[in-house]
Amino acid sequence: MPLFSALRYKNYRIFILGQALSNIGNMMQMVAVSWLAYKLTDSVFVLGLVTFGKQISGFFTGFFSGVIADRFNRLRLLQVSHFALGCLSFVLFALVWYEWITIYLLIIVQLIMGVLKSLEIPARQTFVNDLIIDKQYLANAVALNSTVFNTARLLGPTLAGILIPLVGEAVCLSIYGVMSWVIVVFFFILKVPLQK
């Protein structure tokens, strides 16, 4: 089977491009938030606490997220979650840009983002199944998803490391907001039958 065989489906090509942009933006934001937490407090403990806040909120809501992804329309869940993630990124951008940010506000935003990401992840992972009509290409699509994610784990922090000293954390935060909204547009372009 050819290496990129799942890309024969236009819907999947649009989806994977959107995921590449979104994942890079997400990784950039993670670095920017960590740097910001340390800059605000000069505390390694608080840096860990901010990261923990995002993960723990996703952990507790994750018990219900898979059920929600199965019971509700996954395409709509993805549209709503990415739109909300973009909104939160721009709220964070504004707080940093106007120097209103505090460590408490940063933790609150991270907690909310953790909940949204816990809804988005199972919907996104199972949505691939809706995009690949011939299931013999499904394994290839999953492998390409993993490749895109792991590539973003390299590119996102690298770009953030370059941009933060040049233009500041706020710009990195806004990039994820833009990319989240771009993927919402991509989701509207997809021609996928509604599951529910």
Image (cartoon, helix red, strand yellow):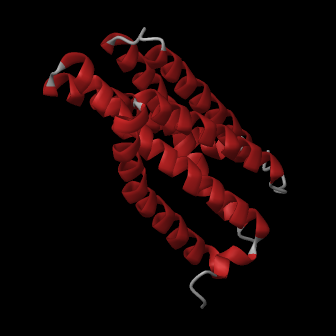
Q: Residue 133's spot in the image, x, y percent?
A: 75, 72
Using residue 64 as the reference point, say whether residue 127 is left or right of it. right
Residue 183 seen from this side: yes
Query: Which image quadrant: the C terminus?
Result: top right
Residue 134 seen from this side: no
Q: Residue 165's spot in the image, x, y percent?
A: 34, 36
Using residue 66 as the reference point, say whether residue 75 is left or right of it. right
| Residue 109 placement: quadrant | top left
Using residue 30 as the reference point, say whether residue 126 is left or right of it. right
Query: Which image quadrant: the N terminus?
Result: bottom right
Q: Determine the residue positioned at 42% across, 43% down.
A: 28
Of 150 and 135, nearer the camera is 150
The residue lying furthest to the bottom in this view is 1
Q: Residue 136's spot in the image, x, y percent?
A: 65, 82
The residue lying furthest to the front in this view is 166
Q: Residue 126's spot in the image, x, y percent?
A: 60, 56
Q: Determine the residue positioned at 72% across, 60% down.
A: 14
